[in-house]
Image: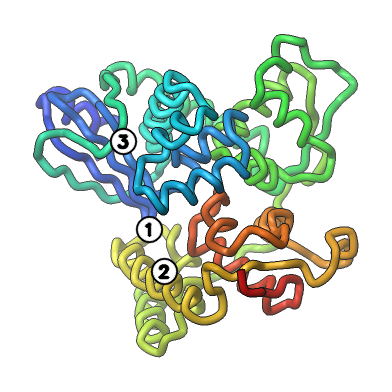
Amino acid sequence: MAFPDLLQWVSHARKTGALSVQQDTLVKRLFLREGVVVSSGSNDPREFLGQVMVSQQLLTESQLKEAFDIQEKTHVMLGRVLVEKQWVPEEVVTQALKRKTEETVYSMFLWAEGDFEFHEGNGQADAAISIHLKVEEVLLEGLRRYDLAQKIRRAFPHKMVILDRTRVPPPPELMANAFARRALELVDGKRTLHELCLELHAPEFTVSYFLLSALERGFVQVVAPDKEEGRAVTHPPVADSLRAAKELIRAGALEEALSLLEQISGASERSSEVGELMKVAEVNLIDRLYRSSLPPKQIPYLKRPLEQLTDETLTPEEVFLVSRVNGSWDLKSIVSISPLREVDALRVLKRLKERGIIALKES
């Protein structure tokens, strides 16, 4: 079933329960009551409440880190911690939760494929707020975003596109918006679209949509590159790769298994087994890295000052994490405030340690 058809089915049948949609290891859930979306969940860090609030300039990374420290000790929900610390008014947290739920719903319109399950139940989720999102409204906005995504892809063919500001000044009302102001501050003729998404703690669609508007209004321009470098790589059949991945997992070569599974995750002859194997490899790799090379309470520090790293070739993810290594935050804190998935952040930190860019010390 196409995702819009799936939504119409749960709506017309006035279903109550949880609709779970999965693409490889990414899982998103919609909680419904009599065919109406009342809440959602996602394991994509960019759709977590804390990341949403940082992206909207409602919270700093330092505040988010402190809130996580409090949450770890008290087990109080993040939104309640923010209100009790008087960092964010309760009504702002409520609006952020609603916006987070809407973005999770709309993002699934951009998925080309996935697997779904529906579990009938009481339609309740462990959330601080229930919203009332009618499927008819969701369909209209979701289909609009699908059309916009095609337009965005024509303007920005890939995430390594670099943009720069033009001499056209943005209007004052636009610069009054915290997200817009921060986004335009970061557009400098050097950062790629991918780097902008990381720095803004926001999904690619959100950032790209804003930049498309800025491009059309003449505030920004694409400077390079309009085509992604590199040539197509031919991979062995999915069945052969799956067998090889299973052997690697059995042998304990978890990173190698993950790299192989990531290569075939977008294959046309996709198998749901890919996602299951990726979950196994990721869970075991996270546990191994924390127990061996990256103890969560140890503090990373730079072995050379940032200004001396200009001769290093760093990926956008490496640049983001290196810039958060301040000599006082432990590994777990840096991973928690990152918009990267836990396993991805740990793999990047492991590479940085192996390359001698960072080292660890006891807290």
Front residue of 4 and 80: 80
Quadrant in which residue 24 is drawn: bottom left
In primary-sequence order, the first of circles 1 and 2 is: 1
Which amino acid, by three-letter code, is at mark 1? Thr
Which label belongs to residue 282?
2
Which amino acid, by three-letter code, is at mark 3? Ser
Where residue 289 sits: x, y (%)? 50, 75
Decide if residue 363 is on the left or right side of residue 127: right
Report the residue marked by disc 3: 40
- Vertical placement of 251 versus 43: above or below? below
Where residue 67 sits: x, y (%)? 50, 43
Question: How far is disc 2 from disc 3 in space, using C-alphas?
Answer: 23 Å
- Marks 1 and 2 close (CB-CB < 8 Å): yes
- Marks 3 and 1 close (CB-CB < 8 Å): no
Front residue of 278 and 306: 306
Which label belongs to residue 25?
1
Which amino acid, by three-letter code, is at mark 2? Glu
